[in-house]
Amino acid sequence: MKLHYFILLYLASLSCFAQSKNDGFSIELIHRDSPKSPFYNPALNQRQLMYNALQHSINRASFLWSKLSTSIIPDIHGVYLTKISIGTKPSAKLVAVDTGSDLIWIQCEPCVHCYEQQTPIFNPQNSSTYKPISCDSTQCMSLPGGSCYTRKNTCLYSARYNDESYSYGDLASETFTFDDATNITHPIRLSMSNITFGCGWMNDISTLDVEPAGIIGLGASPYSLVSQIKSKFGHKFSYCLVPFFQLNVSSRLNFGENEALISSTKHMVTTPLFLKPPKVYYFLKLLGITIGNTTIRFHNTSKKVHKGGKIAIDSGTTFTFLPTHMYSEMETIMKRQIKLKPLRSNTTRFLQLCYQGLRVSDIPPLIFQFQNANLELEALNTFVNIGNGVICLAFAPAKHLPIFGNIAQTNFFVAYDLDNNTVSFKPQICARL
């Protein structure tokens, strides 16, 4: 009788464990400029870091727009990084994580042309779980930019980037292993088999810097990681990004429900999510922005660019880009409501509205009015420290595509539900997760 009881108890514990595993998992996100990143450059001061972030944001915004009608991907360099392992003899690889990319790819041996990376290049000959994908498979025939190596009947992928970098190689499937950080004190290793990815044996990066070993795409296409694991964890992912002044702490990327990360849904707001072909990028509908007691309404200035009030939400763009008329009105209202005298633009060069010694109490409340959701931003979401006591508005006018960038998303739990096409925001001190 006791033996029977303990068997039932053991089976029940296994069932609970399996259920908790299917609830979701979390991985560490490291900002490229974090002291925890191998790309951290202590010689760069705050102003240089902010200038680099703005230039990267401008380039990315331009090419996110161009990608809507071409096969070019914004960039390879990545703002956020994570560690993964691949194959039957897994060793850690540092890869970029990007909501603006769909394909997963890793540098592979034997390299015809590869760039320098921090860790050894993956050799598929050392893994028994590596499987090339055939030309007549659904994955190959549906792959944008895919082709066939007829002599071996293997599928080839091609990824091009806005700075003329590229990756080219075999489309294959392999086992990927992640360090599940849901329980930071007792992390576990989580392996997922038959993940479709690009095994790149010809890769070229335009910069001379050491770069990540590849990219994990989080876009909405079937080839992204979130889409490939949806049968086990659901078609959902979320993240919580720490502010720029706390980059010594890692951010968190979550797959599946992971309800333990949210104590309650109080103060959570939810807005519809829109996809545009090629269904890689995520868009929200922006109705207006309220600053203090003044509201700026979204109105079309170009049928092509701003139709429907859509604004892309992107983790890889640092600053937020607004339609020119909205940005101009925002700057005017900020100047009127902030009682300090702004610095002359030639003293800051790259951001248009800056102050010396601006305090949190000087900054008016700012609310983004998305469809069905009023999202109130904190001071750290609207202004950024560029060094030497200079604080600048973290927004810029959009030449092409409006983008809700990652400064505006810091210290929010941002949850994407791709089954119901929604995005939810909940205020959260991300460094405490």
Image: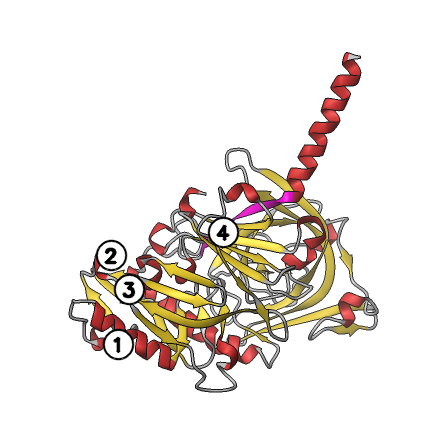
Circle 2/circle 1 CB separation < 8 Å: no
Question: Dot 1: within a 10 Å radius of its alpha carbon, few (fewer than 14), some, or many (20 or more) residues?
Answer: few
Q: Which mark is residue 431?
A: none
Front one among 101 and 378:
378
Residue marked by disc 1: 332
The amino acid beneath tag 2 is Val
Helix, strand or loop under label 3: helix
The amino acid beneath tag 3 is Arg
Name the magenta segment's main secondary structure: strand
Q: Which mark is residue 29?
A: 4
Comes first in the chain, label 2 or label 4: 4
Work out whether 27 lies above or below 299.
above
Q: Tell me the quarter of the picture where residue 183 sits.
A: top right
The amino acid beneath tag 4 is Leu
- Can you tell which of label 3 and label 4 is closer to the viewer? 4
The amino acid beneath tag 1 is Thr
Question: Dot 2: within a 10 Å radius of its alpha carbon, few (fewer than 14), some, or many (20 or more) residues?
Answer: few
